[in-house]
Amino acid sequence: MNDYVIEMLNITKTFPGIKANDNITLQLRRGEIHALLGENGAGKSTLMSVLFGLYQPDEGVIKKDGKEVKINNPNDANALHIGMVHQHFKLVEVFSVLDNIILGAEDTQAGFLKKKDARKKVMELSEKYGLKVDPDALIEDISVGMQQRVEILKMLYRDNDILILDEPTAVLTPQEIDELMEIMREFAREGKSILFITHKLNEIMAVADRCTVLRKGKYMGTVDIKDTTKEDLSRMMVGRDVSFTVEKKEKLAKEVVLEVRHVTVPSKLHKNNAVKDVSFEVRAGEIVCLAGIEGNGQTEFVQALTGLEKMSAGRIQLCGKDISKFSIRDRALAGISHIPEDRHKHGLVLDYTLEDNMVLQRYFEPAFQHAGFINKKAVRAYTDRLIEEYDIRSGQGPVTIARSMSGGNQQKAIVGREIDRGTPLLIAVQPTRGLDVGAIEYIHKQLVRVRDAGCAVLLVSLELDEVMNVSDRILIMYEGELVGEFDPKYATVQELGLYMAGARRQPQFGGKEDEVTDDE
C-alpha cells in the first residue's frame, strides 16, 4: 500500500508576470501533520488551490493513494475527501452556522431540507472535537475564531480526511491557537492527514511532523521537525539569518501626541458598551501596546479613534487639538495613520490597482494631482519606490489588481503606505498578521524607526511575543475597560495572560490591592 495519501509531482503554475509554482513536489503521508512554509508570495496558497481544484496546473500530476487524479474543481476535491479552510473564510455572513456547514452538501427529501438529521450530525461533530458552536447564530454576529470552527466543521461534515488549513492561526487568540493545535493532533491520531500553511515557526515546531519549504515559487526541501530548528527553517525560507529579537534603544518619550479621556463606545451586538470610560495617553517617541483577547473592545476603540465608529462619551486630542468630532478624512489630515485590522474591508479597495491603493488618502495632494487631474507619472513613481522599499511582490508591479496579491503582500502595501505618510501618530492594528518571519522582522524595525523619529505609535496586537518585544508600555483591555499597565521589561507572558482573561485588575483601574503582584 502506498505510504503517501497525496502526491503533487512537479507542479508548475504561472500567472501573468509571475511563476507562482516552479516544478514543486509535495508528498503527504497518511496520518501526518505536514507544514508548508514560505515567505509571502512564495506560492503556498497557489499550490494548495491547485490541490483543491481552484486552479489547474500548467505542468505536473496529482496522485491520491498512488493513483493519478484530475481535480477540476472543489467538488472533485470533496469527492476525493479533500477539504480546505481558506485564509479568508468562505462563509455567507447572513446565513446561520448550520446553514453554512451544510451548504452544498444538503440532504433533501421530496425537495425539502432534512435539517434535523444535519443538525444532529453537526452537534455530534462539535461535541466530539470540542468545536463548540451555536448552530442558529448568524455568521456576521460571531467572532473570527468561531467562524474558523464553522469552516473546520464544514470539512468534517463532508467526511474529508485530507484537510488543508491555510494560515489557520492568523486570526486566533493564543488560547484559541492552543485549542486548534490539540484538535489537529486529534485529527492526526484518527488517521486524517493535514496540510498546514503557516508563517509561525513556533507552531510548526509544536505540532508538525514534517515541513516543506518554498522560496519564490521554488521547492527548497522537506525536513523532519525533530531534526531541525527554528533558525534552520527561517534560513531555508528567506535565504538568510533572521533575528527573533527586536533591537531598540531606550525610549525618549516627549510631549503627549494622543490624549484619550473617558472614551465610551456603544456596542452593536448587545446593550452594554463595547468600550467603557477609557483614558490614557501616548507620547512622541514611544510605542504603547493595547493588548487583549479579541472581542474585548479593542476594535471598537480603534474605530472610535479613527472616526469609523461614533463615541457616546469622551474626548480625543491629537497634538493638543480636540478631534472628537472630526470626519475620517479630517482625522487623517490632522496626523493619524492607520494600519487597519481588516485589510480587505478597511485597508484596500480590492478591485483597484496597487498604485491607486497607495494614494487613497493622498491623491488630492499637489504632488499627485494638478487642476483636478491625477498625475499618473507621480503616482507610478511613488508606488515603485514603496514596492522597492517594502519588498511588495506582485505579478504586474504597480498595475497589479490588489485582489490578486497574496495576503502578506497586501499587508506590506498597507504598512508601507501608512508609515510613509510620516504622521505624528501611527495606529497599527495587527500589523504583522499573516506575515512571514522576514517580513515581521522588517515591520518591527519600521515601527521602532517611526518611534525613534519622534512619532507616537499605538500598537494593537494579540501576539504576545510581539507585545513583549516591540512595546515600551503595555495596556491590557478586558471587556472594554483598561485593567492593567505594564513595563514589558518586568512583565511576564503568564502575568499578562491573567489580566487578559479578567482574573486580575490593578488598583488604579479599580482592582483590589491584593490582586496585584509586584512587576519585579
Image (cartoon, rainbow, N blue to C red):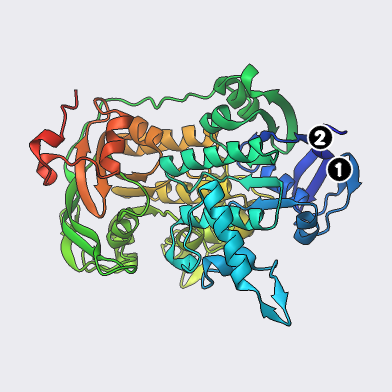
Rate crowding at label 1 as few (under 14), some (14 to 19) or many (20 or more) other CA atoms within 10 Å: some
User: The disc labelled 2 sits on which kind of residue?
Assistant: Tyr
Q: CA distance from mark 2 to mark 1?
A: 9 Å
User: Which of the two residues, 172 or 358, is positioned nearer the viewer here?
Assistant: 172
Q: Which residue is mark 1?
A: 63
Q: Which residue is mark 2?
A: 4
User: The disc labelled 1 sits on which kind of residue?
Assistant: Lys
Residue at 47% x, 73% y: name it. Answer: 372
Residue 512 seen by the camera: yes
Residue 351 percent across, percent down from the top left: 60, 65
Residue at 48% x, 45% y: name it. Answer: 433
Residue 57 percent across, percent down from the top left: 83, 49
User: Which of the two residues, 253 or 454, is positioned nearer the viewer here?
Assistant: 253
Of the 4 image quadrants, the one containing the N terminus is top right
Of the 4 image quadrants, the one containing the C terminus is top left
Among the two numbered marks 2 and 1 on one chain, the one whose residue lies closer to the N terminus: 2
Query: Is residue 101 depicted above or below 145 in this figure?
Result: below
Residue at 67% x, 34% y: name it. Answer: 34
- Relative to 160, 282 lies left or right: left
The numbered disc on residue 251 is none
Residue 389 seen by the camera: no
Residue most extreme to the right: 67
Residue at 58% x, 20% y: name it. Answer: 229
Q: Nearer the viewer, mark 2 or mark 1?
A: 2
In contact (CB < 8 Å): disc 2 and disc 1: yes
